[in-house]
Amino acid sequence: MTLNLFYFLSFVAVFSALMVVFSKNPVYSALYLIVTLFAIAGHYILMKAEFLFVVHIIVYAGAIMVLFLYVIMLLNLNKDSEPHKSSILKFAAAICAGLLLIVLVGSLKGTEILVRAETNTAATIGDVKSLGKVLFTDFLLPFEIASVLLLAAMVGVVMLGKSEKEH
Amino acid sequence: MISFILYKAILVVVIFGITLFVAAYSTYAERKVAAFLQDRIGPDRAGPFGILQPLADGLKFIMKEEIIPNVSNQGLFVLGPSIAMLTALMAGVVIPWGGSLTIGGESYTLQIIDLNVGILYIFAVVSIGVYGIMIGGWASNNKFSLLGAIRASAQMISYEIAMGLSIIALVMLTGTLSLREISQMQAGGLNGDWTFWNVVYQPVGFIIFLICAFAECNRTPFDLPECETELVGGYHTEYSSMKLGFYLFAEYINMFVSSAVIATLYFGGYNFPFMNDLGLDQNLITIIGTIVLFLKIGFFIFFFMWIRWTIPRFRYDQLMNLGWKVLIPVAVLNIFISGLIAVL
């Protein structure tokens, strides 16, 4: 049952991820991306990580993708207004994305040991309390660095928004 | 196992039915309250006191001609109201509607599922709900609809942040995200376990949450997405028949669910004063508790309507200023002070 669900969710995730790339209409791409995010959130449920599931949906599907859609709708992008990109740009983008994928896979490679150490408490992995404990003890430094990074991004956005007005 | 599934299935159907019933009669109550506040009579033709008005309205919506504009995106046009209705109905799953009934030695809890992240689940559902409006507004291929959809999404994202922050202070107080545990914490009696409703400990948080609930439900004074003086009908300009009905109905369901969440988080949920001191049977206490919860919900629904017919609509910049420059700083300050009090 769980395995079948896993295959189903994976199929939905991969299929809609492909549709994100192949859709001509940017609004469809964004909607397929939302479906992908839901399918990935479903994997968290399979791992009994309800907290991650809910937070994933709130943050990605509920906030970030709404902003994506918002911008796409506001700009009213469609086939006619799509800027023509030279093939060298497309080539460069593909290589960059591929390199990013390698970095992501590489960074995940070392985490197997960590995961195995933590899954001794597999039953409580989705529990808010145990997640909080792990975040604030073993992973405190990466957690704080991530929050500083987000803060820096926020400050940057405010700066950009401000300088526009003065001109 | 079978009895467990049966009991959950019955509970789901009953809650579904009650939600629809309350939402239907909220439309009637809205018109009656509006009439009362404006010194009119209100609907009084269908049945005694117009009590059958919601049925007549529903029938009218179903019988009307269904129009899907040629220039619209037809799949998404139908998807919009469906998502709005679906997400509105999904939120009732985690709300504790009552204590537990003991029938024939078996204990039945009046809640469909007690997630340990109940509050966050409600947030997730609410944040998905905006897609119904966005998709519908965009698929209509109408400038007014699009403007309404864009307003709705900007408004909901802005107020979700303040809402989340106001809840953090409450969660710091209760130490749990489960709605059932939060309402159980507010149960109390005279025998040394005297506890107040959370609104006593979190008055500022409650006011922020209430204002944000108005904004999330697109209720006046925050109903700019469907501001008829500027946008014809906002995101549902192109909709007709039951699809329009779904949008309007989803708003009333959202109002019902928000009232239930407010009652549960801040006003003791299904608990009532002296519930453990009256020496009543546990089943009777559960039933009275559920009735009390519905009375609280009824009061908040009335409050939603009361505000609607009292306060005029905000201007859009006022809405954004209130959300970002007032509610969010106050909510952060509230977290800070609550933390300080909790530590001291």
Image (cartoon, helix red, strand yellow):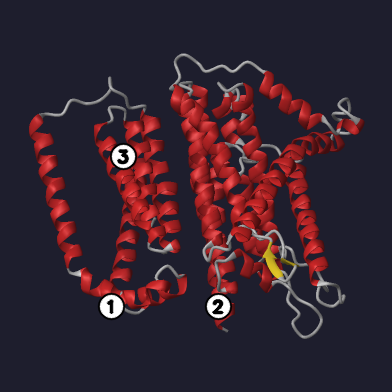
Mark 2 falls on what kind of element? helix
The reply to whether residue B309 is in sight is no
The label number, if any, that marks residue B58 in the structure image: none
Residue picked out by circle 1: A117
The chain containing the residue under callout 2 comes to B
Q: Name the residue: 29% across, 40% down.
A: A15
- Residue A25 point in image, percent of width and height: 31, 28
Residue picked out by circle 3: A16
- Residue B268 point in image, percent of width and height: 72, 66
Outermost residue toward the front?
A: B2
Is circle 2 on the same chain as circle 1?
A: no
Q: Name the residue: 59% across, 78% down.
A: B341
Of the pair B31 and A18, the residue shown nearer to us: A18
User: Badges 3 and 1: C-beta atoms under 8 Å apart?
Assistant: no
Mark 1 falls on what kind of element? helix
The label number, if any, that marks residue B340 in the structure image: 2
In the image, residue A119 above or below residue A28: below
Q: Name the residue: 77% across, 54% down.
A: B294
Is circle 2 on the same chain as circle 3?
A: no
- The local crowd at label 3, few if under 14, some if 14 to 19, many if 20 or more residues have their Cα within 10 Å, is many
Q: CA distance from mark 3 to mark 1?
A: 33 Å
- The local crowd at label 2, few if under 14, some if 14 to 19, many if 20 or more residues have their Cα within 10 Å, is few
Q: Is B83 situated left or right of B258 in this image? A: left
- Residue B310 point in image, percent of width and height: 76, 40
**On the image, which quarter does residue B19 sit in?**
top right
For the residues carrying marks 2 and 1, which lies nearer the camera in this image? Answer: 1
Of the pair A89 and B8, the residue shown nearer to us: B8
Of the pair B112 and A118, the residue shown nearer to us: B112
